[in-house]
Image (cartoon, grey):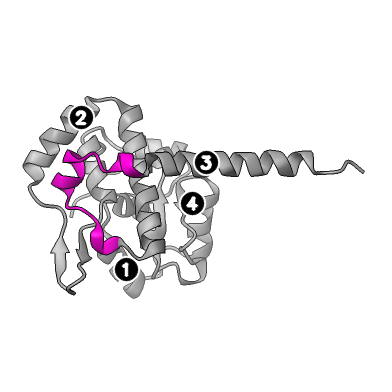
Amino acid sequence: MIIDIDLYTSIIEGLNPNEYIFLYLLYKNHIITLQKLFKFTNYLTKDEVNSLINRKFLTAQPTFNIEKYTETLRHLIVEATFIKLLPQSITNPFEELLTKFPKRVKRTDGVNDYLLTDLKKSKIKYNNLVNKTTNLHQHILECLEYELKHRHKNNTMKFMRRLPNWLESEEWRTFEQSMEEDKDNIKNERIETSYGTELL
């Protein structure tokens, strides 16, 4: 595997080469490669991973465990702070969707089903859909992230659609309203807490 590093940009952003490669591999979903690195070398320490989170290069999902960070890498999300540093050829919308979409699920009969099928057709469909509109692409990724959290929590990953069907049915819209309602509830809770705070 060959990884090009823009040293000037990474230094300006305060990233050392190890951090850059870590974020790149995580962004490209090369989890096994990363775990091998951690197994045979002290690649990044817990404090260094925490630093990437604090500097907004990563977001940790609730299921991420910093004490077991090498085992829970899948629960880290690479943020736009890093993605914007990558060459445009790397960050095309469909490629980014593939890094977020689950590769396989176990169906109700116990059989592993591969979800990333018919990629050529899916790529054309997706590119036509987002039409280089960053906002829609980012919104779809946000809805997908919400769907995956919902399915993990409710043990319904076995019903996840294959990518071509997911795109054709615009499945993200199924979770769109719930996601927005959750955001509104959190916002309202913060407002109520704010009004309920007494000034001493």
Numbered disc total: 4
Label 3, label 2: how far apart the Cα atoms are: 25 Å
Q: Residue at x 39, y 41 (%)?
A: 82
Amino acid beneath label 2 = Leu
Q: Residue at x 79, y 43 (%)?
A: 196
Residue linked to disc 1: 35
Q: In this view of the protein, can residue 10 be seen by the observer?
A: no
Amino acid beneath label 4 = Leu
Residue linked to disc 4: 52
Residue linked to disc 2: 129
Residue linked to disc 3: 183
Element type at mark 4? helix
Q: Overall secondary structure of the magenta stretch? A: helix
Q: Quadrant of the C terminus?
A: top right
Highlighted range, magenta = 157-174
Amino acid beneath label 3 = Lys
Residue 111, image x, y percentages? 15, 72
Residue 51, image x, y percentages? 53, 54
Classify mark 1: residues with Cα within 10 Å, few (<14), some (14-19) or many (20+).
Answer: some
Residue nearest the viewer, comparing 126 with 67: 126
Q: In this view of the protein, can residue 163 be seen by the observer?
A: yes
Residue 148, image x, y percentages? 35, 54
* Quadrant hosting residue 135: top left
Element type at mark 1? helix
Question: As drawn, is 101 to the left or to the right of 67?
Answer: left
* Quadrant hosting residue 1: bottom left
Amino acid beneath label 1 = Gln
Residue 192, image x, y percentages? 71, 41
Q: Is residue 149 magenta?
A: no
